[in-house]
Image (spheres, rainbow, N blue to C red):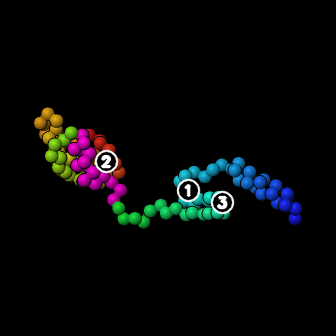
Amino acid sequence: MNIGKVLATGLTVAGALMALPSASPAQSLDLYLGPGGPDVRMRDRDYDRDYRRGCSERQAIRRAYSLGLDDPEIESVTRRQVVVDGVGRRGRYTTVYFANRPGCPRIG
């Protein structure tokens, strides 16, 4: 087979692959073409890891302290919210509510 035909066919296939829409980053399969040849990588999504996907008590206390509460303490933890009590900036007793989600967003 003629080397020119092989090279032209290879470039045509590579161009066609480049024209295809790229896969979204949420996919778990990556294909890399480089000087070392093709490389296929399967990403692990860590679904089987055992960790809590919410706001921990430590995170809630840190967030309350960064909001200006002195001596913050956990009052209650439910599946929806984490309640933190403490002394506010002007010496008043203050209650702060955080959602029991990653990042501890403030809800009240």
- Tell me what residue is drawn at x 16 percent, y 43 percent: 70
Q: Secondary structure at mark 2?
A: loop
Cα separation between marks 2 and 1: 28 Å
Residue 68 drawn above or below residue 43: above
Task: Answer left or right for 55 relative to 16.
Answer: left
Q: Residues within 10 Å of mark 1 (few under 14, many from 20)?
A: few
Q: Secondary structure at mark 1?
A: loop
Q: How many marks?
A: 3
Disc marking residue 35? 3
Q: Is residue 80 visible?
A: no
Give the camera-side residue of 35 and 85: 35
**Disc 1 vs disc 3: which is toward the camera?**
3
Q: Secondary structure at mark 3?
A: loop
Q: From the top left corner, tell me how far across and down residue 39 is, in percent.
A: 62, 63
Where 1 falls versus 93 (above or below)?
Answer: below
The stretch in magenta equals 52-67
Q: Which residue is mark 2?
A: 104
Q: Earlier in the sequence, mark 3 or mark 2?
A: 3
Q: Nearer the viewer, residue 88 or 1?
A: 1
Real-space Cα separation, disc 1 to disc 3, in angstroms: 24 Å
- What amino acid does circle 1 point to? Gln
Whether residue 17 is visible here, answered yes or no, is: yes
Q: Sequence order check: which comes first, mark 2 or mark 1?
A: 1
Residue beneath the point at 21% across and 39% down: 68
Q: Of the numbered discs in the image, which one, if any, rests on residue 27?
A: 1
